[in-house]
Image (cartoon, grey):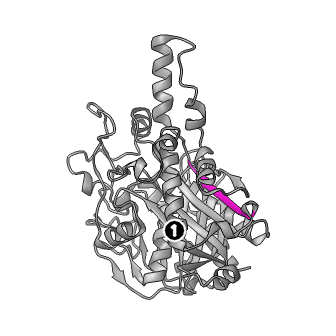
Amino acid sequence: MRIVVTGIGIISSIGSSKERFWDNLVAGTSGAGSITAFDATGFDSRIACEVRDFVAQDHLDKRRARSMARFSQFASAASMQAVKDSGIDLSAYDPVRIGCIIGAAAGDYEILEAQHANLLSKGPGHGNPLAVPKIIPNMASSNAAIDLGARGPNVAVLSACATGAHSIAAAMDQLCLGYADVMLAGGTEATISPLVVDSYACMRVLSRRNDEPQRASRPFDRDRDGFVIGEGAAVLVLETFEGARKRGARIYAELLGYGSTCDAFSIAIPEPEGLWAARAMEIAISRAALSPERVGYINAHGTSTGANDKTETLAIKRVFEAKGWPNPPVSSIKSMIGHTLGAAGALEAAATILSVHHGILPPTINLENPDPDCDLDYIPKDARQVPVTAAISNSFGFGGHNCVLCFGKV
């Protein structure tokens, strides 16, 4: 069964609409700046890619907005954008045939931290009764369903930084199995909070380039020193090709297949030879009924950390160069939107889809001093206009969770 993308909704640090997001990606605009969500004085990393143009009441009524954590607000807003963008009339469908799979890797730490502080200062019995339903990660998918009246398959995938990609893959399965006619799928995250930022900084994975935040995220660059934490959401409308054609929908791209593997190596370090990341790429390409030489673009996981960028380069070479095929162009949009954790796979999938649709490949900004261990064509600095018939989007999460999505032009 053929599955296609007919709607895209975006909340991001470089624009909270599909159009602004894409225009700024192509322009190489960074969303990084000094943290404003809390006082980061004294923190090792004091920079983030925050969503600064989002007002919840622009998308939700005041009461609904107050009942939701920020990551859920992002998910609902992106879902409603995606539905509007698709032109689909959900009321024409059996609501049990409309599903949502929108994941978050963390949920809401800001409320968790506030509730903990409140417990310590006031003692038991003084907490917010809405704290738990605001915090838990499945509420993004649940709240989007409430706002859309979607009563079909509804789960929350959680696979760290591969969450958004796995959510899209799981939604594809629901459609292919015939369990739904329309699926909303993607990822969301809003974890720019003291505990999260300090915890990642203690792992030594965050950039400390605090004086020049827009130059801090530099995937594949010799001088990279970690990622810039980000936030945002992306949600896709997925439906069958036949269903989309029947209603005369505009189709952005076809979801040709996906590959999912596990490193089974470490809770935080990628398997250093890129063996299982490569296998995920191979599975995605094979399920898409493609040969590697037909892949015209790779949207990399590209975190701007030493281990990930080197390992991903090795994995790409295993799939392409080692088998005699030329390596396709690669870029990392984390150079612009930072690492959005559970939303990363969805935002990067959206960028890949738009690349296929428009024939433009977004750049890897800040790639000024190439790392000798990262020697592929990373589209440095400027976007590239190239017709693409097929592309893959890589997502690799803590715990060795690997998911690769393959999209093609229709």
Relative horizontal placement of residue 144, taking residue 93 as reference (left or right): left
Quickly name the residue at label 1: 84
Q: What kind of element bears circle 1?
A: helix
Query: Which quarter of the picture shows residue 410?
Result: bottom right
Q: Position of residue 111 (x, y in %)?
A: 48, 32
Name the residue furthest left.
Answer: 211
Relative horizontal placement of residue 1, taking residue 382 as reference (left or right): right
Q: Position of residue 44 (x, y in %)?
A: 31, 36
256 within the magenta span: no
Residue at 38 percent across and 55 percent down: it is: 338
On screen, residue 157 above or below 80: above
Check disc 1 and give the amino acid type: Lys
Can you say which quadrant of the picture contains the N terminus? bottom right
Residue at 67 percent across and 57 percent down: it is: 150
Give the residues in magenta.
Answer: 97-104
Q: Nearer the viewer, residue 277 or 106?
A: 106
Residue at 65 percent across and 52 percent down: it is: 157
Q: Position of residue 15 (x, y in %)?
A: 35, 61
